[in-house]
Image (cartoon, rainbow, N blue to C red):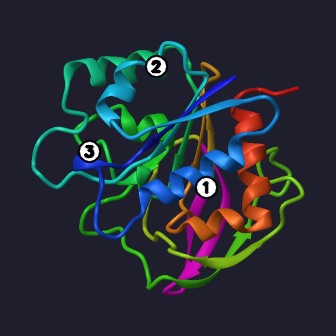
Amino acid sequence: MRVLVLSGAGRYADPWHDFAATSAALAGVLAAGGREVSIEDDVERGLADLAATDLLVVNVGNPTDGAPAPASAAAIAGLRTYVGRGGPVLAVHTAATTFTTEPDWSPAIGGRWVRGTTMHPPFGPALVRTVAPQHPVAAGVGDLELDDERYSYLATEPGVSVLYEHEHDGRSHPVIWALETAGGRRAVYDGLGHTAATYEHAGHRRLLRQAAGWLLRDS
């Protein structure tokens, strides 16, 4: 199985996230069970060439230069073709904030950051509670206690299965969810992953490996 990790660089980088470090850590977690994992930090090029990709992993930031994202016709076509053929997506952390001019992106991953509404409390200790322990992605993982950012007030698409929530401002907020469309295409969004240390947490590593297995339909 070929897994491609798109890593934020160039216009898809930002001052708050070390995408090179988090992508390397994420790739290390996913490189199990004979999977071939590669990292591509030219986001447009990576999107344009997904024909041989079995699992697309997105760990990129939001361009702030005002240009479309994705920008090139080839990247847009590549992403739409991949999703259209049922290609699974694992989107992490800032993936909810990117590809803002692509109308198919939020439905592809099950939700998005809403400008002026979504926010996060300061980075620090977080308790992320499982609400669907029977789901194959969350099975046996339990609650997660780790240092991370907790995105709050994300907008979710119809049909998502919320797997983990956190409490903020007296409300429960979805932070990890799974999506399986009527056509059978699968996606997982994991709102954790602000730093590489997140991927050293045993429970989080298990969850991500199970997510990859579910997305790739491992037996």
Q: Residue at x 48, y 82 (%)?
A: 123
Which residue bears the numbered disc 2? 50
Q: Regarding mark 1 in the picture, which secondary structure is present there?
A: helix
Mark-to-mark CA distance, 2 and 1: 22 Å
Q: Quadrant of residue 72?
A: top left
Residue 105 in picture, x, y percent from top left: 38, 36
Please tell me how crowded label 1 is: few (under 14), some (14-19), or many (20+) other residues with Cα within 10 Å. Answer: some
Depicted 59 relative to depicted 103: above or below: below
Residue type at tag 3: Thr
Q: Which residues are magenta?
A: 160-176
Q: Residue at x 73, y 68 (%)?
A: 201
Residue 157 visible in the shown view: no
Q: Nearer the viewer, residue 81 or 75?
A: 75
Mark-to-mark CA distance, 1 and 3: 26 Å
Mark in front: 1 vs 3: 1
Please tell me how crowded label 2 is: few (under 14), some (14-19), or many (20+) other residues with Cα within 10 Å. Answer: some
Depicted 118 relative to depicted 86: above or below: below
Overall secondary structure of the magenta section: strand
Residue type at tag 2: Leu
Q: Residue at x 86, y 51 (%)?
A: 134
Depicted 183 relative to depicted 89: above or below: above
Please tell me how crowded label 3 is: few (under 14), some (14-19), or many (20+) other residues with Cα within 10 Å. Answer: some
Identify the image quadrant of the N terminus: top right
Residue 211 visible in the shown view: yes
Q: Regarding mark 2 in the picture, which secondary structure is present there?
A: loop
Residue 125 in picture, x, y percent from top left: 61, 86
Counting residues from the start of the chain, the first of labels 1 and 3 encountered is 1
Mark-to-mark CA distance, 3 and 2: 20 Å
Which residue bears the numbered disc 1? 25
Counting residues from the start of the chain, the first of labels 2 and 1 encountered is 1
